Every structure is written in C-alpha cells, then in structure tokens.
Amino acid sequence: MAYEDDDQSFEALFSQAESNSITFEPQNVTDLMSTSSNRDFSRYVEEQENSVGKPKMIGCIPEVDLNIKEFRPIEKYFNEEPNQIYDDPSYYKKCLTGEGQSSQRLHGLLVKYLNCQDKKDKTVYRQQIVTAYWEFLRTLAPKMASTGIPDCKRMAMRFGILLPSLATPEQKTMFAKSIDRNNTYEPVLYMDEWIKSIALGHMKPSATDEAPVKGGNKGPGAEQARLQQLKSKNSGKIQTSESLLNAKESERQTLEAQVKNRMEELFVHESVIGFEPHKAPYTDLQRKMFSDITNLFRSLQKVDKELTNYLNDFKEAKGIEDSLNAKSGEIVEEVSVGKEEILGEMNTLRQMQKMTCGRQGNQFPVFTREFFHCIDKFTGFRENVIRELQWIESIDPQCFCRIHKNIPHRIVPYTLLVPSYGDSGFCWEPFDRFNRLSSRGRICIPMYPRDLKTACLTAVADLRWQVAKEKASFDWMSDGLTGHYYQYLEEHKMKGDIKQFFIDDYILWMTKEANGTQKLDKEVRAIFWRYIPFPQELKEELKKRSLAYAELFQRDINRSMSDGY
C-alpha cells in the first residue's frame, strides 16, 4: 500500500533514519512523575460530587453504586469541534522525544516498514514493530499519572496513533472529535486512563498467575494504595448493608400496613338492629383476624431483629468509612504503586491485546488506514461501547447482576478499550477474589473490530460464564447455568472448548432468538430461557410468535407456582 506522507516532521526524521542518529531532547522521568499532584483529578472529583443523582468519581472511575439500575443515556457521542492535536506538524517527534532507546528503535523499524516494497520483508518488520511499540509504551506508562504529559503521548497509548499521516483526513477528524474525558459516569476506560488509575491507586493491578513480589512498595504511596483497597472493600459492605436495610424497611412497611388495615377492620362494629345504640360482637371474619394479626406481629418481630442487625452493620461500615477518609486525607496523593507494578500491568495489557486478536489475528499496534475499516458509529469509542452494553442489558437484564441473599446487585465491570484490530472481547476476571460481593469484574473490548456489537457480546458472554462458574464452585458441572449446559454438551458428545460453545450460543440467543428466530437447539433454548431470561415484556411477545416459546413461558408459570422455582 502506498502512503502519502503529509507530516513534515516525519519527512525530517525520515532523512535521518539510515544513520540512526536521531537526537531527542532528554526528559527526566522522575521530574515528570513528581508533578503528579493531580489538580485536574481533584477538581474533576469535586465536580462529580456536586452532581445530583450521579455516582461519586475517584479520578475517572465511578464508585460502585447499587442504587443505579441502568446505564445513563448518552447525551453526546462526539464533540462538534475537532481537536487540533493531529494537525500538529511535530506530533510524531513529540511522541518519541524523551523515550530513549525504545523510541529510536521504533522509529528505525517504522521507517523500514513504510519504505519496504518486498512483502516478506514487510511482514518481518511488522512483527518487529509489535515488540518495539510495546517497549515504547512501557516507557510511557509510568508517566501517565502526570498532569504534564503531552496529549500526543496519551493518544499514542489510547488509540495507537503514533503517526497521524497514516490515517485518512476523515479518520483524523473522527478521532479529533472523540470525547476526551469520562463524562458517562461508567467504568469504561481507555488504556491511558487504565494505567493512570492503577498508578494513582484508584484501581488494583489486574490479577495474574505470577507470584507477588515480596517486600514490595513502601512509604506513603503504598499506604495510600492500602487505604484505597480497604475503602473499596468497605464500600461494598456499605452498599450491601444499605441495600438489605432498604429491603427490610420496605418489608416492615408492608407488614405494618397489613396490621393497620386489619386493626381498622377489627374496630368496625355494626349496630344491633332494634337494640340501638348497642354494637354487635365480633363477626367470624373479625375473630379470624386475631390469629392473622398475631402472625403479622411475629413476622414484624422477625423483620425487626434482622433490620437491627443490618442497621448495626451499616453503622459499623459508615464508621470505618469515616476513619479511612480521615486517614487518607492526611496523605498527599502521589503515584502510589511502584514502577515494577506499572510495567507488570503493561505486560498484562499486552496479553489482553493478543487475546482480542487470537493466535492468527493482526496484532499490529500502530493505527493505520491499511487495517482500519470501521465507521465512526462502530468504532470502539467509550460512548459507542456503552451504547452496545446498554442494548445487551435491555435484552439480558441480569447480565451484570450478582445475587446476594436473594437480592440482585447490579455491578458493571471495568471495561478496558484496547486499540486492537481484533474481533473478540473477553472477561479477564469476573470479580476481585478478595471481594466477591461488590467488586467489579474486568472485561476487555477491542476498539477496531469488524463488528463492535459482536465484540461486546463475546465479552459479556465470557463474563456471564465465569460468574456462573465461580458461583457454582466445584459443582459447576452439575449445577446452575454451567452445569446444565455442560450436561447438554456431554449428552450430545460435543468436543471442544465449552466456553466457546457457550459464547457462540449466547450470541445467537441475543441476536436471533430475541427476535423470534429459532437458531438454538431445543435443550439450549430451555437452559437459556431459565438462566439467561429475557425481560418479561419480551417473553410475553415471543410466546405469541411460536409454540416453542409458549411452552417455555408455561414452564415459567408452573415453576412459579411450585416451591422449586
């Protein structure tokens, strides 16, 4: 493919490629990181706290709020006026300046790749660029917590845009109009925001199978991270206890209303005809109310006992929150994790990027019009991904819910948008292993897939499977969603990746069966109908369209009338 280079800085650097003598201005990483007082973050948090009906923001991440039941409507997908960042003639040079040997190696390989005419040599250079670019991102990662980092470096990590001239004018305009800040109040993050949040202790590093380093980070930064972890766990206790408290208060209110109604009926006496003003004795129906009221009082006593326990738990959690807030207020916010942890997270992100592409996929990390074939509405920008997740939740209302004491808790997972040409999203972890109750899971979605809806569906399907499997624990092959699906595969002697079978069937369930088009086997449809139910309105509509759905709808009625539902 021929590239028409319109970047003046690239032409200037091109002439120096053969000698490999590019001189970049040195930049002190320590000085850059020390500017991380995060004035912008503090102001941003204050703005969010003053907003009514919105979750509290920690940096660019919203706290878990169990009172939120759905995604907020997206008010704006793109800015009206484009940012001029990609029109800067020195964009490329600013990106590479101060990044040492990694930037020089990347530049040399990129020049060879773009000038190469031989297909085999170009393939070799392309593979070498993959490694060189991730080494370049590793040098950028510790600086992401700084408020003084140039925007071009953030965009190189966020969108993979290293050289703007590799994009068409229309593509540059599209990216220039993308919304920079997280105004959605959802935990959907670009890669630079992800690294920044981890560096500041707003998020824990992603879980891996590697053994933790002993005697790791110490000092105020480590203490800040520890306090943030305690606050996260305690926040889950507050949300859960308050949710249970609200449920018991509602139950008490219902019982009290029943007692009040029966008492009022009990106090009504008709006059005895011919013997006025004497009143008649209790009727048989009123006498029956004595036992009813007694049973209601017993129920109220039980509810009051449970309510007292939940209230004490809530008070205790609020007290811990006040104590943690007081301690964290004494610590000046800084880069709270060590460089090793940040670089370790970058290694994890590279693995995530590979997983979105698959073994045979295109892992090229630099944005180029050669591989990009999306339109603006179906590129993995934050607002577009939230739109797709909102659509998924409208058909599968329980996709982000976890049940605790028969109460569903809606917890949207952290969603990483990685600049990748892959087509599959996936779940990295269903929840924090130390806080299964209220912690967010982690899913990853590629930004430049052929079909954004399918990429989001695969991620949610993977999340669904892993949450159900963890819930069933060692009974996962015999109980619940995973158990029934596994038994179906065993009965039909189907060999292969069980989870991949499930993901493929989930996509059909959401895209075909939800519209009344029967594509799944009868057994799978019955499993999904029970464990991945559609909204009641959709169920009632589907039962009118096919006998298969009408039969499943009748099974719901039968189960609801039995004790085993």
Image (cartoon, grey):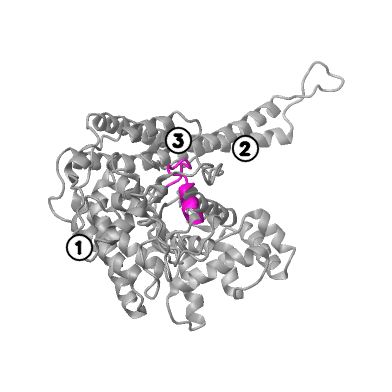
- Which sits earlier in the primary sequence, circle 2 or circle 3? 2
Residue type of the residue flagged with mark 2: Asp
Residue 186 inside the magenta-drawn segment: yes
Residue appearing at x 70%, y 62% in the figure: 542
- The residue most toward the bottom is 493
| Of the two numbered discs 2 and 3 in the rendering, the one whose residue sits closer to the viewer | 3
Quadrant of the snapshot with the N terminus: bottom left
- Quick check: is 296 in the magenta stretch? no
Observer-side mark, 3 or 1, equals 1
Magenta span covers which residues? 170-187
Q: Secondary structure at mark 2?
A: helix
Q: Is residue 326 visible?
A: yes
Q: Residues within 10 Å of mark 1 (few under 14, many from 20)?
A: some
Depth check: 15 or 182 in front?
Answer: 15
- How far, Cα to Cα, is label 3 from label 1? 72 Å
Label 2: few (<14), some (14–19) or many (≥20) C-alpha neighbours in 10 Å: some
Residue 352 pos. (x, y %): 35, 62
Observer-nearest residue: 467 or 442? 442
Identify the mark nearer the N-term, 1 or 2.
1
One can see residue 435 in this view:
no
Going by the numbered disc 3, the residue's amino acid type is Leu
Does residue 536 sit above or below 46 in this rendering? below
Q: Amino acid at mark 1?
A: Asn
- Can you tell which quarter of the image residue 59 is in? top left
Q: Which residue is mark 1?
A: 20
**Contact between labelled residues 2 and 1, with CB atoms less than 8 Å apart:** no
Please give the residue where the numbered disc 2 appears in the rendered image: 292
Q: Name the residue carrying label 3.
A: 307
Above or below, 492 relative to 88: below
Q: Nearer the viewer, mark 1 or mark 2?
A: 1
Q: Earlier in the sequence, mark 3 or mark 1?
A: 1
